[in-house]
Image (cartoon, rainbow, N blue to C red):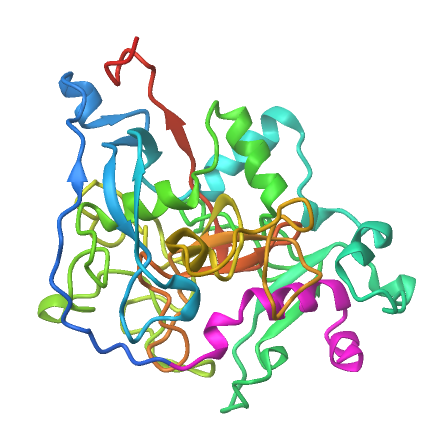
Amino acid sequence: MIQLLQNIRTPFNNILLAGSMLGVMMSCSEKSTGDKEVVSQIQESPKSEETVKKQDGMVWIPGGEFLMGTNEDEAYPAEKPAVKRSVNGFWMDETEVTNAQFKKFVEETGYITVAEQKPDWEEMKKQLPPDTPKPDESLLQPGSMVFVAPKQAVDKRDISQWWQWVDGASWKHPEGPGSDLEGRWNHPVVHIAFDDAAAYAKWAGKRLPTEAEWEFAAKGGLSNSRYAWGSELRPNGNFMANTFQGNFPNGNKGEDGFMGTAPVKNFPPNQFGLYDIIGNVWEMTDDWFDAIKFQRLSGSAPLLDSNMNQCYNPTNPYAQERVIKGGSFLCSDNYCINYRPSARQGHAYDSGTSNVGFRCVKDAPQETLGMK
């Protein structure tokens, strides 16, 4: 295992990535289960016309009860079983945070992202097996994980066939040195670690969504629908999100018009007015990842002892991971069917990749919610 990690330049990032991508290592059909769509019990929206619609690039998400997770046979174990949850109303960015928006943040604050800094071995080894040897100092360079499509079919069990650590890759240079954001300023920003996203959110006067808030918003009132827009992946043959068409990872046909990230607002919004809530890039949430969260919530598994570990991933026991949602342009019906609201994965909190981004939320004033 260590030899494999050294081959792709950074043991730390690949161990985290291997765990966070467990879901896509499993096979599952895109076939719909035919579950009946159940409309969530939505709280009444604020009375003001301005509040009901949009405000400063955000849309109002009315709170309410909903079924979180799924009981579909053709879903991953981490999504089951469905449990009843509720959220209060909140504002949510109508799009993922774009390169242009992140650029403004960096210009005003001088912020330097995690990917632009040299990895700290003392921090890295906290998430690695105790006997993991320190890599050569020459390997500890600023950079990030980049998807590079192989030229031929490969063993899908070996993610190093398409994920490469690239020195110098960052939000400004998505494919590494020599690449830039020309023509991509309205694409979602990537190569962002959790702390980067949290820093942006604080600067913007916002925060990252909880997993429950994100899923409630993504479902758009269709609590038991397989997709964010209904029960069919491509209603009337229309592409509803930026995903991977063809044989993953080498055979992307780009039938939806894109081989990588897409400009925001390129696909239809869901019923709450959220664009690209599915596909394009995975989106970070504020929750730590627990692989059996819904089993715990349903009472079929013991509660997580957060004094021992704040997250739980049996395939990656040393890593500290946050929940990501929504799937990305790399989700394919023959490898990863995570382009669904209930889908969830763990993602290393202190590193980014070329297919993970974020959007922010903001709490409504108490008087807006009718509170005193």
* Residue 87 on the magenta segment: no
Q: Quadrant of residue 231?
A: bottom left
For image coordinates 28% across by 60% down, the residue present is 241
Near-viewer residue (292 or 281): 292
Q: Quadrant of the N terminus?
A: bottom right
**Residue at the far top in the pictured view:** 372
Magenta-colored stretch includes residue 17: yes
Quarter occupied by residue 234: bottom left
* Relative height, residue 79 to residue 68 (above, below): below
Does the image show residue 39? yes
Q: Position of residue 278 (x, y in %)?
A: 32, 56
The image position of residue 82, as x and y in percent, is: 30, 58
- Percent across and percent down for residue 39 are 13, 48
Residue shown at the point (34%, 71%) measured from the top left: 75
* Magenta stretch secondary structure, dominant: helix
Report x, y in % for residue 24: 46, 73
| Residue 163, above or below 230 | below
Q: Quadrant of the C terminus?
A: top left
Count of picture labels? 0
Q: Which residues are magenta?
A: 1-27
Residue 294's place in the image compared with 153, above or below, is above
In the image, residue 323 sits, relative to residue 7, either above or below, namely above
